[in-house]
Image (spheres, rainbow, N blue to C red):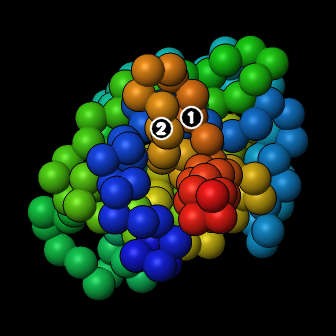
Amino acid sequence: LYALAVPNDAAGKMSLPKRLKIFEWGENQSRNKGIYRVGPVTLAVLERNQAASGFDRIALDFVHNTVPGTDAYKDSSEPRPVAAYGVLRVVADDGVYIEDLKWTPEGEASAANFHDLSPAPITDDDGNVVFVHSVALCRQGELPGIEFLSVELNTKQEKTMTLGESITKRLMELNKDRAE
């Protein structure tokens, strides 16, 4: 996909993000697994639960390969490759983020092969997100609108765009240059 859509000279302009949104504030309707709620309960308990469980930094993995029981977990072995490690932050009236991402060599080499993000949450009986095991880079995530944000087009300003927006913008620039 990227070899066709992103010209070679764009590679120097791409950078991996330090922060990714994984849940919106409020109800997050998944495609197949119901509703995940992020609100006052998540704000009150998520970060505390992460620390108490030893998950103060979590994996940004590949297709849930660090989640026991998944096909990707069964198909891999230790040490399982991960793209990055980060810290979860709940921002009131905004959502949940994985921040302070520290990218691995595997992540730097392979992240551009994935379009979506898919968190692996645990909820309480009311559907409130109370713990997140990890977040996966994947091709088709469960939560519509939660995408992997990866391209910083202007290194002089900190503007993060969705990959689709940045590719569209870059292609429009190239077509404009060719027309002139």
Question: Foreground: 36 or 140?
Answer: 140
Q: Are the residues at dot 1 and dot 2 in contact (C-beta closer than 8 Å)?
A: yes
Say what amino acid the circle numbered 2 marks: Glu
Q: Is residue 149 visible?
A: yes
Q: Amino acid at mark 1?
A: Thr
Label 2: which secondary element: loop
Residue 126 in view: no
Q: Position of residue 64 (x, y in %)?
A: 43, 65
Left-right relation of 26 to 44: right
Residue furthest to the front: 180
Please state if 99 lies on the left or on the right of 162 as rendered: left
Q: Which residue is mark 2?
A: 152
**What is the distance, in whole Å, between disc 1 and disc 2 at their CAs?**
5 Å
The residue drawn where x is 48% and y is 38% is 152
Image x and y of residue 138, in percent: 50, 67
* Residue 139: % across, % down: 54, 72
Q: In the displayed structure, would residue 124 be above or below residue 39?
A: below
Q: Nearer the viewer, residue 128 or 5?
A: 5
At 26% from the left edge and 42% from the top edge, which residue is drawn?
A: 103
| Of the pair 154 and 21, the residue shown nearer to us | 154
Badge 1: how crowded within 10 Å, few (<14), some, or many (20+)? some
Quarter that holds the C terminus: bottom right
Give the residue number, with chain letter if any, for mark 1: 160
Q: Say which element carries label 1.
A: loop
Q: How many marks?
A: 2
